[in-house]
Amino acid sequence: MVGTVTVEGSLSSPNIGNYYVGKGILSIKLLGESVFTDCGNAPVFEFMAKVTNLDHYSSRTGVRVKDFTAVIEIAGSLTMQLEELTARNMGFALLGLPTGGPSPTPDTIAILGTPVIYGSVKFTGTNLIGPLWTVNFPLVKLSPSKAISLIANTWGVVDIEGDVLYDQLSSGFGTATVTQP
């Protein structure tokens, strides 16, 4: 017998309405800023949870057996690709923040002038297929993750990694909120 499958209006399984093709807007608010700034087109935005375990083995039998695993460390990381080479996005890659004014004033970046960049990262889902996710990371250390190619035969990208840190103000690493479109 074949069961009934709901297409929309439920975040419970089974439900083909929960299949997901991700799209969304990535924005960053640097420490000291009051608003998030859109990073432009970002074809890659990934989060990876990292868990470090400490295994315990009983030595009461002829062969040691694992009888307990304790989580001793948790961490998270972000992977981002930014396709728009704005002064702000280039600043993330060059480890220097732009000092110019609003357009059309030219921006200048002191390369390696800001070796540690902290901010909040927000993803707002805009996908047409699947649930809409809004993910907020209140404290992230941003760093370039690959060389920036200033000569290429493909679209240029700025590859950024984020070290997700525990935020004392919000008492956590962030939040993820889901809604059904």
Image (cartoon, rainbow, N blue to C red):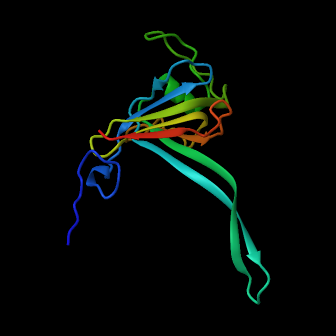
- Number of numbered tags placed on the structure image: 0
Image quarter in which the C terminus is found: top left
In depth, the one of 120 and 68 nearer the eye is: 68
Image quarter in which the N terminus is found: bottom left
Q: Residue at x 74, y 75 (%)?
A: 57
In depth, the one of 62 and 158 nearer the eye is: 62
Q: Quadrant of residue 109?
A: top right
Rendered position, 1 above or below 137? below
Q: Residue at x 69, y 53 (%)?
A: 73
Image side of residue 49 versus residue 70, left or right: left
Q: Residue 142 location, x and y as percent?
A: 59, 35
Q: Quadrant of residue 93?
A: top right
Q: Residue at x 49, y 13 (%)?
A: 106
Image side of residue 38 versus residue 175, left or right: left
Residue extending furthest right? Answer: 59
In depth, the one of 132 and 50 nearer the eye is: 132
Q: Residue at x 48, y 35 (%)?
A: 150
In depth, the one of 60 and 80 nearer the eye is: 60
Q: Residue 144 location, x and y as percent?
A: 57, 38
Q: Residue 172 location, x and y as percent?
A: 62, 39
Q: Quadrant of residue 38?
A: top left
Rendered position, 169 above or below 144? above
